[in-house]
Image (spheres, helix red, strand yellow):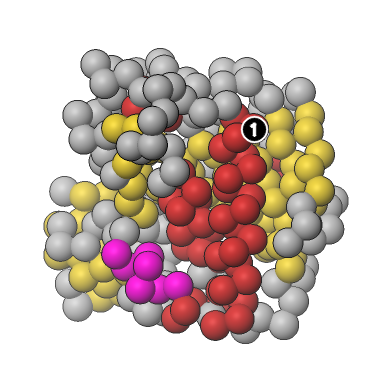
Amino acid sequence: MDWRIHHFEETISTNLLAHDGAPGDVFTAAFQTGGRGRLDHRWLSPKGCNLMMSAVVDLGGLPAHEAATLPLAVGLAVADALRAFASPLAIKWPNDVLLGGRKLAGILCERNGDCGIAGIGVNVLQTRFPREIAARATSLALAASPGLCSPAAKLAEKGRTGAPAVDEVRDAVLAALSRTLAEWRAGGFAAIHPRIAALDALRGRVVRVRQDDSLDSPFISGICGGIAADGSLAVGDARAWAGEALAV
């Protein structure tokens, strides 16, 4: 896919910009004043340190149940791209990429007519995080500093001695996104599910999951059976289709 990159030094949110875009448009920013993740969580990032990007993708002709798996398809693409820079990576349903058990990237997908907006945030150069998330967040720069990162996280063993530039990460993610979305559109979620299942961070763990995206939604709890072939999360004998999963 030929991506057209539109960069802004500052904006409210790249996802907001993407609502006026067409398939193939990519909006990036050095700084967001109103960046957010799912469930209205704020996405906090110092200026120029991290990748903040929203790509517009064509969903025309896709059945609704397939379009709903876009966040997982994007998560797989991000994990594939970041594997060149650090390991071990995992996908935490429905929208996070973990490095060494800590959050490295987050995804926020929105529907806009026949288009999907794939909002992607990757912690690249940030080395300090707010106290409330410091214990569960990481970055590629921290993976380059073994004394600072999660003991499990490390740089990919390709002779790299430091964190990549933000633009290098952007280009790697867009290349992987092109490949993964082409496979996903051609074969549906079933075509990429085995690769996602192999990276599942929650399978086999005891989890609590909100049953939808509302903050007052009841939890379901149980041993996680993993990301199912339809994109839902198996929790005991139940299925979760949206919400937030917490390992107990």
Vertical side of 50 occupied by 40: above or below? below
Vertical side of 52 occupied by 48: above or below? above
Identify the image quadrant of residue 101.
top left
User: Where does the image place residue 96, in percent across and percent down from the top left?
Assistant: 42, 48
Say if the magenta span includes residue 89. no
Front one among 160 and 130: 160
Query: Chief secondary structure of the magenta span?
Result: helix
User: Where does the image place residue 95, in percent across and percent down from the top left?
Assistant: 45, 53
Say if the magenta span includes residue 193. yes
Q: Residue at x 78, y 33 (%)?
A: 7
Residue 9 lies left or right of residue 196; in this view the side is right
Front one among 52 and 244: 52
Q: Residue at x 29, y 64 (%)?
A: 198
Front one among 34 and 3: 3
User: Where does the image place residue 186, in percent across and percent down from the top left?
Assistant: 61, 81
Front one among 207 and 144: 144
Q: Residue at x 32, y 67 (%)?
A: 197
Is any atom of residue 165 visible in this view? yes
Q: Quadrant of the N terminus?
A: bottom right
For label 1, the residue is 167
Element class at badge 1: helix
Residue 20 lies left or right of residue 176; in this view the side is right
Q: Name which residue type carries label 1.
A: Asp
Residue 219 lies left or right of residue 108; in this view the side is left
User: Where does the image place residue 157, in percent across and percent down from the top left?
Assistant: 33, 37
Residue range in magenta is: 192-198
Q: Label 1 crowding class (10 Å Cα cut-off): few <14, some 14-19, many 20+? A: few
